[in-house]
Image (tube, grey):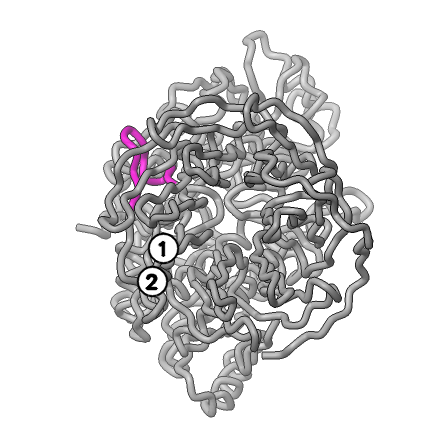
Amino acid sequence: MRVLVFVLAAIILALPPAHAKDTGLIFVSNEKTNNLIVLDPKTYQIVKDIKVSRRPRDMHFNADHSKLYVACGDDDVIDIIDVARLEVIGKLATGPSPETFALDERRRRLYVSNEEGSSLSIIDIDQNIIVHEVPTGAEPEGVFISDDGKTLYVTSEVGDLVHQVDAEGGHVTQDVAVGTRPRRFAATPDGKELWVTAELSGEVYIIDRGKFAVTGKIEFLPPGMRKTDVTPVGLAMTKDGKTAYVTLGHAAHVAVVDVPARKIQGYILVGKRSWGITLSRDESKLFVANGFGDDVTIIDAKTRKAIISVPVGRIPWGVVIDD
Amino acid sequence: MIEGAGLRCCEYAISIAVGLVCLASSVVAQQPRITIGYVEVAGDARYEPITAYGRMVLKSRERPFTGAQVALDEAQALSRVLKTDFALERITVKSPSEVAAAVVQARDTAGIHFFIVDAPVEAYKPLADAVKGRDVLVFNATAADDALRRNVCAAELVHTAPSLAMSMDALTQYLVSRKWSNLLVLEGPLPADTAMVKALENSVKKFGARIVARTQFKPGTDPREREKNDPALLTAGSRDYDVVFVADSAFDFVRQVPYHTVRARPVVGSIDFEPVAWHWTWEHNGAPQVNSRFEKRSGGRHMEGADWAAWIAVKMITQAALRTRSSEFEAQRKFILGEGSFDGNKGLAVSVRPWDHQLRQAVLLAAPYQVVASAPVEGFLHKTNDLDTLGDDEPETPCRLNR
């Protein structure tokens, strides 16, 4: 394993971000139109269309929500957005085709999977240098960081693997084989389980984090659907660790799962190629990006019914909320 | 990217002899190794470039070895997890008739169980006879002939290339779904053209389309034969048609057909709208990443159907090692032919049909710059797996490997 210390040209403007707390604004990344759509939390009207670098996908806020980071796959950068001003204020250079990432502000690190580079880049946010390039299986995708910031988990879509990575040392410590084309993660709040979607085998795999071994799996099949249409990708879990929501991609449904029982409680109809999913902070609403519906479906989490679907632009990938 | 030590040492061996030296030298490696033989025929006419007048290259037609290499690259992380190396051994023989002996020799002297065979159709019957009952599994990555599936029907073969029947079914499904059900068929002089039309006739019957007229064309400019070589005259019949289907495996005459038809009708078959196993513009199911890895590996070439068929063969083998957690050939063979289902990056998971060992898979319907649709086309349903609406379903073939 080799360590790349690779200085990249980057521009971070020195402007301090202005402050605006808990705006409730909803941010949607559109893969095809290179923009973020910002929706009003009450009316769901579009309040802003932010032009970003090409092919924006995964998004994460910093701790105080003053900044939003957006991975832009076709320009090999992560754009930084000032949440108060709703403007791009800087960029971080990454490896080829950044897709998803995790942020650790305390350590000033950003961990990003490079879809076309078969590696995970560990980036020093302040200096914008890649401090480690961790080789992974082909097409790394989901990135998850432990609460203590010491351990990372990365999927390899082609390798059908989840890698456990030493965040500080920048190397893979263990691998575990899961279902076909593993995509994204969610962790139970007790820190014991890691859930990972397997897109092509239509399952969620449950990994015991202590043993780093698969201890269970859940297979999805909404009524009237064929197994082959069920392609789970996105995951969201409630803070009490009781309920998980899983987007089922081409099956155009979100599955609701009782986490401790590992039982499916029901399915909610959404749009096609539903991937990105996020819960509002009060966990009353769910937001789902429908990639082949060009819209976002907003779901009442209590009644488990869609309230409205809002058109946002071409191929929406993910949703985050400033709340 | 890490270069796996020894992983690729054998790739460029061009004869068994060279390959064996290479294998012997790698015995020092601690890990067990699964070697996949890649057998090709020197001077295989299917890889002569197709040129227009004045040696203008229309299609360069490359061997699909790069496809196998890409899948081997992808297996690097698996190699670490399984503590097993994967290697490709390229074996080149002088004629199709030598393929069988080369496979047997590599099995006996180098212990190779898995083979990808990239050879013309005539190589397969002797090959099937030679390996009958042996502990080998041979992937046919390039021969589409239905007879290999129906009549040769060998338990040691797996066909990762879609059969001609599958391709014609895919094309016909799409035409029927558009209600473009009336076909004018122009058939070339080569046996491959006749085979294509024969497969089309079956598909047309199966899906309720109609061939309104079937005419042989004769490439050339002889004015005395203009009824047979002029696309306008060939398409001027009184009966209307929705599309012109041209079977021209030489890719010669067919180039003159689009925009030269009497009626304004699309041309399908050997040009403009073709059923393929893979296309460089397919943008779903993670295909862009596969294309990108392939283009990097090949120095910029677009990935094609045969490349996919070689790629998936290697992937099936490496996946079998992962899923069975076994280094035993028998366990891997059973998995591939049995419960194994694999991500082919074109939608529905691919798997081997137990009755004839054809890999069930989606077929892409490609225009030059866009995949128009993927078959099975929406609405064509099957009681167990929609992929089995393409090609020979169990009751439709004389081959009964599962009985």
Instruction: Identify the image quadrant of the N terminus of chain A.
Output: bottom right
Tell me where residue B137 appears, x and y as whole percent. 35, 65
Marks 2, 1 in one chain = yes
Question: Which residue was labeled with disc 1?
Answer: A188
Circle 1: element type: loop
- The residue that appears at 62% across and 45% down in the rendered structure is B280
- Residue type at mark 2 is Lys
User: Do callouts 2 and 1 mark residues in contact (Cβ within 8 Å)?
Assistant: yes
Chain letter of disc 2 in the image: A
**Residue B315 in the image: above or below residue A306:** below
Mark 2 nearby-residue class (10 Å; few <14, some 14–19, many ≥20): some
Could you give the CA–CA distance between mark 2 and mark 1, rounded to whole angstroms? Answer: 6 Å
**Which residue sits furthest top?**
B238
Tell me where residue B81 appears, x and y as whole percent. 41, 73
Q: Is residue A168 visible?
A: yes
- The residue that appears at 48% across and 44% down in the rendered structure is B346
Give the residues in magenta: A219-230
Q: Main secondary structure of the magenta part?
A: loop
- The residue that appears at 63% across and 17% down in the rendered structure is B265
Question: Which residue was labeled with disc 2?
Answer: A192
| Quarter of the image where one finds residue A282 | top left
Chain letter of disc 1 in the image: A
Tell me where residue B151 appears, x and y as whole percent. 31, 48
- The residue that appears at 71% across and 21% down in the rendered structure is B260
Tell me where residue B126 appears, x and y as whole percent. 37, 62
| B218 inside magenta stretch | no
Q: Is residue B95 visible?
A: no
The reply, left or right, for residue A223 in relation to residue A31 is: left
- Residue type at mark 1 is Thr
